[in-house]
């Protein structure tokens, strides 16, 4: 499994534990690898992808009347929701991002498992923490 993941352009290292059902991936800086690509590679190798803990950078935008993260260098867009352990974090992020017109934030959070179905909601990130990147 780790060999298949390392073949994805932009993945620098992959450590897989089949016993734990876990893959820890290190991506190259500035990569354009998407979670969709990673999950497809996992499926092609006979496994079922689950939720993913991620650290991702991008720009905060409004989408569907909600705050969203437009991932830098890609067309990936994640609606932002508070993680259960971080109530109010998205509002805090919105105040920081939209009030200051910042260009980049780094968000740490969880992308829950979503069943592939037509009409499924957009991908969401349950935001645990964030930081503003000052340029």
Image: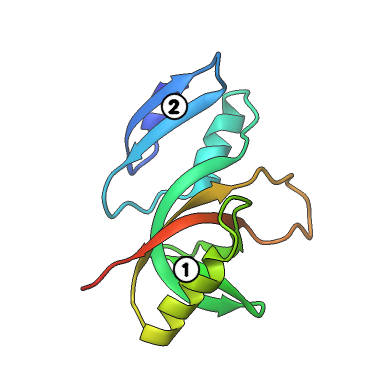
Question: What's the distance in space between the residues labelled 1 and 2, CA to CA?
Answer: 27 Å
Q: Residue at x 58, y 48 (%)?
A: 111
- Percent position of residue 106, x then y: 37, 60
Badge 1 crowding class, 10 Å Cα cut-off, few under 14, some 14 to 19, many 20 or more, is many
Q: Position of residue 71 (x, y in %)?
A: 43, 63
Q: Is residue 1 left or right of residue 115?
A: left
Q: Quadrant of residue 115?
A: top right
In the rendering, at what x and y percent does residue 68 appear?
Answer: 55, 70
Is residue 124 among the parts visible in the rendering?
A: yes
Dividing the image into 4 quarters, which one contains the C terminus?
A: bottom left
Q: Position of residue 101 (x, y in %)?
A: 37, 84
Residue at image coords 62%, 25%: 47
**Tag shown at residue 105:** none
Q: Quadrant of residue 15?
A: top left
Of residue 42 and residue 105, the one placed in the foreground of this image is 105
Q: Secondary structure at mark 2?
A: helix
| Number of residues whose C-alpha sits closer than 10 Å to that of mark 2, classed few (under 14), some (14–19) or many (20 or more) | few
Q: In the image, which disc is placed on residue 70?
A: 1
Left or right of residue 117, residue 17 in this image: left
Secondary structure at numbered mark 1: strand
Q: How many marks?
A: 2
Residue 73 visible in the current orientation? no
- Judging by the rendered image, the residue that carries numbered circle 2 is 4
Q: Residue at x 33, y 37 (%)?
A: 26
* Occupied quadrant, residue 118: bottom right
- CB within 8 Å, label 1 to label 2: no
Q: Nearer the viewer, mark 1 or mark 2?
A: 1
Q: Residue furthest top?
A: 19
Residue plotted at (47% across, 28% down) = 23
First in sequence: mark 1 or mark 2? 2
- State the colouring used for the structure image: rainbow
Query: Please, is residue 34 above or below residue 130 in the view?
Result: above
């Amino acid at each position: 499994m780790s060999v298949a993941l390392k073949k994805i352009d932009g993945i620098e290292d992959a450590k897989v534990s089949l016993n734990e059902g876990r893959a820890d991936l290190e991506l190259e800086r500035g990569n354009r690898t998407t979670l969709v690509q990673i999950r497809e590679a996992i499926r092609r190798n006979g496994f079922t992808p689950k939720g993913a803990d991620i650290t991702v950078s991008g720009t905060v935008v409004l989408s569907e009347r909600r705050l969203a993260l437009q991932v830098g260098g890609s067309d990936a867009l994640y609606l932002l929701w508070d993680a259960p352990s971080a109530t109010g974090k998205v509002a805090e992020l919105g105040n920081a991002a939209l009030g200051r017109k910042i260009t980049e934030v780094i968000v740490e959070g969880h992308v829950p498992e979503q069943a592939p179905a037509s009409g499924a909601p957009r991908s969401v990130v349950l935001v645990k923490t964030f930081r503003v990147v000052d340029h």
